[in-house]
Image (cartoon, rainbow, N blue to C red):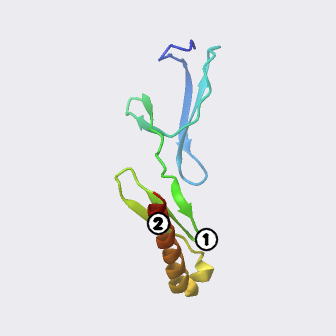
Amino acid sequence: MKKNQREVTLDGMMTIGKSDNNLRQADFQCCEDVKVESFIGRFKVQGMHNGDVYMQELPKRFRNKPLFRLDNSSLSLGRNGRYYFNFRLPESELKALPELLLKDAREAAGKVIKMYLNN
């Protein structure tokens, strides 16, 4: 496939079935000797009644970079202009949730205050 070529047609055989964990899977084997760039990604796949299969790559998911991280939490600014305080805790530490949540929230608030005082 040429670098500026946007589309290539392949002839081959596709096997459609279900995997051991009951998820649908499709395997395509090309019967021509064609060179195409390999790719990996997340795709929307639509299988039609007549056997046609259409694949469309999904856009990359935007991930917010945290402004800072703490032991069990992080604070990030979303694309919508809102701040998100994410708190994670292992199930085994559930009894300590109230004090750990307060501790991390206090530290986050302190860091936000310092951030605004420095600017």
Foreground residue, 87 or 32? 87
Marks 1 & 2, CB-CB < 8 Å contact = no
* Mark 1 vs 2, N-terminal side: 1
Q: Using residue 119 as the reference point, say whether residue 29 is left or right of it.
A: right
Give the quarter of the image for residue 26: top right
Foreground residue, 74 or 109? 109
Check the image and report above or below for 79 versus 38: below
Please tell me how crowded label 2 is: few (under 14), some (14-19), or many (20+) other residues with Cα within 10 Å.
Answer: some
- Give the CA distance from mark 1 to mark 2: 16 Å
Check the image and report above or below for 36 versus 92: above
Instruction: Read off the residue under disc 1.
Output: 71
The residue at 61%/82% (across/down) is 93
The percent position of residue 55, horizontal first and vertical second, equals: 45, 32
The residue tagged with tag 2: helix, strand or loop?
helix
The percent position of residue 36, horizontal first and vertical second, equals: 60, 19
Check the image and report above or below for 55 versus 101: above
Residue that lies at the very extreme toward the front in this rendered image:
118
The residue at 54%/70% (across/down) is 88
The residue at 58%/35% (across/down) is 40
Say the numbered circle drawn on residue 112: 2
Q: Amino acid at mark 2?
A: Val
Dividing the image into 4 quarters, which one contains the N terminus?
A: top right
The residue tagged with tag 1: helix, strand or loop?
loop
The percent position of residue 24, horizontal first and vertical second, equals: 51, 45
Say the numbered circle drawn on residue 58: none
Foreground residue, 75 or 8? 75
Q: Amino acid at mark 1?
A: Asp
